[in-house]
């Protein structure tokens, strides 16, 4: 679980840094850019949640298998 947490932490930090750079360098208007950044952040967060849920399910399955002696 520590690897997943570290990955998600780094992923979110990278997204925040990328969003900041986009806000500073993009030629779009402020409101348009903020809306696009927000949409991408929400999509990335949802993808991260799905990945975390899938990894959790995998780890729980392995744990259950180990408990059964397999």
Image (tube, rainbow, N blue to C red):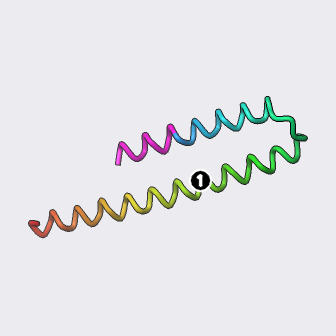
Query: Is 62 a magenta residue?
Result: no
Within 10 Å of disc 1 (Cα), the crowding (few <14, some 14-19, many 20+) is some
Residue 6 horizontal/vertical position (percent): 43, 40
> Which residue appears at 35% of the width and 65% of the height?
57
Figure disc tally: 1
Query: Is 4 a magenta residue?
Result: yes
- The local secondary structure at tag 1 comes to helix
Residue identified by numbered label 1? 45
Q: Is residue 61 above or below residue 32?
A: below
User: In the rendered view of the protein, which quadrant contains the C terminus?
Assistant: bottom left
Residue lying at the far left in this picture: please name it.
Answer: 69
Residue 21 horizontal/vertical position (percent): 72, 31
Q: Is residue 31 left or right of residue 64?
A: right
> Which residue appears at 72% of the width and 33% of the height?
20
Q: Is residue 61 left or right of residue 51?
A: left
Q: Is residue 10 above or below residue 50?
A: above
In the foreground, 1 or 14: 14
Prevailing secondary structure class for the magenta stretch in the rendered image: helix
Q: Is residue 13 left or right of residue 18?
A: left
> Which residue appears at 79% of the width and 29% of the height?
24
Residues drawn in magenta: 1-10
Residue lying at the far right in this picture: please name it.
Answer: 29
């Amino acid at each position: 679980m520590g690897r997943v947490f570290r990955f998600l932490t780094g992923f979110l930090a990278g997204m925040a840094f990328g969003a900041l750079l986009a806000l500073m360098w993009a030629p779009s208007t402020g409101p348009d850019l903020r809306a696009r950044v927000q949409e991408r952040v929400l999509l990335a967060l949802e993808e991260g949640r799905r990945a975390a849920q899938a990894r959790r399910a995998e780890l729980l399955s392995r744990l259950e298998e180990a408990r059964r002696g397999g």
